[in-house]
Image (cartoon, rainbow, N blue to C red):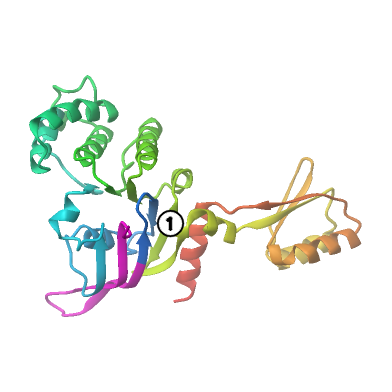
Amino acid sequence: MPPAIEFRGVTKRYRSRFSGQGVTALADVSFEVAAGEVCGFLGPNGAGKTTCINTLMGFLFADSGEVAVLGYPPADVRAKRQIGFVPENFAFHPFLTAPKLLHFHAILAGLDSTTAAARIPELIAKAQLYGHEDLRIGRYSRGMVQRLGIAQALLADPQLLVLDEPTSGLDPAGRKDVREILLALKSAGKTVFLSTHILAELEQFADRVIIVDHGKLVREGPLSELLDRGGRVAILVDHLPEEMEQFLSERGAPIERGAPGVRILVDPAMKREAVEKLWAAGCDVIGMYPVKTSLEDLFLKLVGDAEKAR
């Protein structure tokens, strides 16, 4: 089975019509997303995420490199028939109701009337819009519009969902609803390519993460491996002499005081040295255990390190 998404050395530059100067939006970007994976696509504003998504959707063409979606070129209708898309900024016709809008999109997706008639009420309920069928979209809240956008993306039962900030404008309850939809899609074997800034929620269900910054790939891989790679070891001691505190601080080891003692976070490579010095200083080592980094910590470290390297 081919990857659901495949980028090979993709470069995209925008050129000013007046000055002729170019800006590189993507620079030799390569990654894969396997079928059935939930992949978080991360990066700060201006990192090239929108350009990447537009290239993936066939809205833009790369200057060089290759892109394949479900084994086809992005603009191929055979790929588009299997993709559900929720852009970050969209606007539905304000005078339509949700059922009429979904019926219109069902026609665009080529669904027969029987399938559409069964799917539309199901999706309205899934999007928490039940009871608002007669309300025009122009009177919807931002969160209601966002949930309707997800409903239309699911109409044709696509194999690949491309979601750009799908929880934008949603309150915590709304984000929980979207998370449950994504978990159901994952259980059904669908592929989800998700751009979001809410990293704590993404960490709960993502299989893979891709991080870009200034048009370049910074890091990608299975989430479990990325977080393991960035982890530290916590050493818990009963007290910490001043000279040991200085030794650890000079090596960038965070120190946290509280019950039942002092917790020190060290890199795995220096745990043996730290423990031996603590024992020699008369400290009682109460415990030691690995601590995984969070996705947010990893993201900030990678983006920050990339910025310092420039």
Which class describes the residues within 10 Å of circle 1: few (<14), some (14-19), or many (20+)? many
Query: Among all residues in the image, which is located at the extreme front?
Result: 1
Give yes or no for residue 6 being in the magenta stretch. Answer: yes
Q: Position of residue 226 (x, y in %)?
A: 52, 59
Residue at image coords 19%, 55%: 79
Q: Identify which amino acid the numbered label 1 is placed on.
A: Val
- Secondary structure mostly taken by the magenta-highlighted segment of the chain: strand
Residue at image coords 20%, 22%: 132
Q: Residue 73 sits in which quadrant?
A: bottom left
Horizontally, residue 21 falls left or right of residue 97, namely: right
Horizontally, residue 91 falls left or right of residue 230, namely: left
Which image quarter is the C terminus in? Answer: bottom left
The answer to whether one can see residue 108 in this image is: yes
Residue at image coords 41%, 60%: 210
Q: Position of residue 195 (x, y in %)?
A: 34, 52
Picture layout, residue 147 above or below residue 43: above
The magenta segment is 1-30
Horizontally, residue 23 falls left or right of residue 217, namely: left
Horizontally, residue 261 falls left or right of residue 199, namely: right
Give yes or no for residue 204 being in the magenta stretch. Answer: no
